[in-house]
């Protein structure tokens, strides 16, 4: 993973937060959030299952697609809960250091 990949995830996180703050009728993100946390959580679960099935089938392209979908929906869920990737990275860092 490169610095530009990390920067893209940061940009995507900003876009998601902007869609939550300034919803648009054309925005899938805004419509998902307006459907509520349960719906967002449902999408995270669906995408997780689809990723697992793609992995079981050994379909690399499908694994990439489903991982992208899961990551996006996970980021929407985090934003909905007023959390972000930094919070997750901080927790992973703590676990890695044994703290």
Image (cartoon, grey):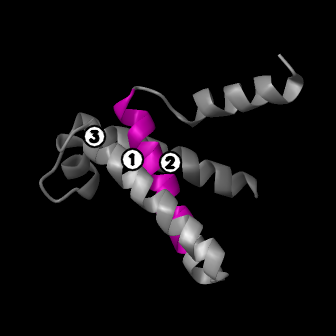
Please state which of residues 79 and 37 is positioned toward the viewer in this rendering: 37
At 60% from the left edge and 82% from the top edge, which residue is drawn? 61
Estimate the x, y position of residue 98 in percent, counting from the top left: 87, 21
The label number, if any, that marks residue 11 in the structure image: 2
| Disc sitting over residue 15 in the figure | 1
Judge whether 67 appears above or below 88 on screen.
below
CA gap between label 3 and label 1 equals: 21 Å
Residue 26 percent location from the top left of the image: 16, 59
Q: Residue at x 47, y 46 (%)?
A: 74
Circle 3 or circle 1, nearest the eye: 3
Identify the secondary structure beneath mark 3.
helix
Q: Image quadrant of residue 99?
A: top right
Contact (Cβ within 8 Å) of mark 1 with mark 2: yes
- In the displayed structure image, the side of residue 98 where residue 23 appears, left or right: left
**Residue 62 horizontal/vertical position (percent):** 55, 79
* Residue 95 locus on image (x, y percent): 79, 26
Residue corresponding to mark 3: 38
For residue 77: magenta? yes
The magenta span reads 65-81
Q: Does the magenta stretch include residue 42?
A: no
The kind of secondary structure the magenta stretch mainly shows is helix
Cβ atoms under marks 3 and 1 closer than 8 Å: no
Q: Marks 2/3: CA distance?
A: 25 Å
């Amino acid at each position: 993973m490169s610095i530009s990949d990390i920067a893209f995830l940061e940009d995507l996180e900003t876009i998601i937060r902007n869609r939550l703050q300034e919803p648009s009728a054309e925005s899938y993100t805004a419509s998902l959030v307006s459907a509520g946390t349960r719906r967002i959580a449902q999408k995270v679960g669906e995408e997780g299952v689809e990723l697992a099935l793609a992995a079981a089938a050994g379909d690399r392209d499908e694994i990439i697609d489903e991982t992208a979908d899961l990551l996006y929906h996970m980021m929407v869920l985090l934003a909905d809960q007023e959390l972000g990737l930094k919070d997750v990275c901080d927790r992973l860092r703590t676990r890695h250091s044994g703290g």
